[in-house]
Amino acid sequence: MSHLTQEERDNLPDSAFALPEKRAYPIDTRARASNAKARATQEYERGLLTTEEHARIDKAADRRLAQDD
């Protein structure tokens, strides 16, 4: 997975994030969607995400992973 620079991240539309209101967990590529799921699980287990946020990230990432490139 390529590194996402701040400029690239800033240029992504809100819809490219699993939590668009926070512009968190980019899911613009399959690799980033997979990474978002893994990071969300880690943060949920540490108590840094709510159950609802974790579910929303998983659902958004799953939708992206189901798409053809």
Image (cartoon, rainbow, N blue to C red):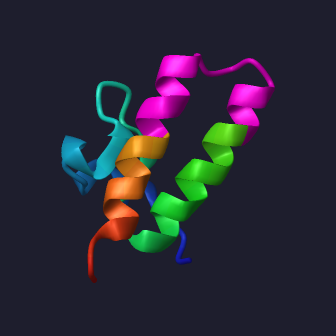
- Residue 30 percent coordinates (x, y): 43, 71
Image spot of residue 66 (x, y percent): 34, 68
Q: Which residues are magenta?
A: 42-57
> Residue at the spot x=34%, y=45% of the render?
17
Q: Is residue 51 above or below residue 13?
A: above
Looking at the rendering, in which quadrant would you find the C terminus? bottom left
The spot of residue 25 in percent (x, y) is 47, 44
Decide if residue 25 is on the left or right side of residue 41: left
At a point 80% along the width and 25% down the height, the residue shown is 46
Q: Is residue 52 left or right of residue 8?
A: right
Of all residues shown, which one is farthest toward the right? 46
- Between 40 and 65, the residue placed more toward the observer is 65
Query: Quick one: 8 or 40, which is closer to the camera?
Result: 40
Q: Is residue 33 above or below residue 51?
A: below
Image quadrant where residue 45 sits: top right
Depth order, front residue of 65/26: 65
Is residue 52 in the magenta section?
A: yes
Q: Residue at x 22, y 41 (%)?
A: 14
Q: Is residue 49 above or below residue 39?
A: above
Q: Residue at x 41, y 55 (%)?
A: 62
* Residue 7 can be seen, yes or no: no
Extreme-bottom residue of the structure: 69
Q: Is residue 42 visible?
A: yes
Relative image position of residue 24 (x, y in whole percent): 44, 37
Q: Quadrant of the N terminus?
A: bottom right
Quadrant hosting residue 56: top left
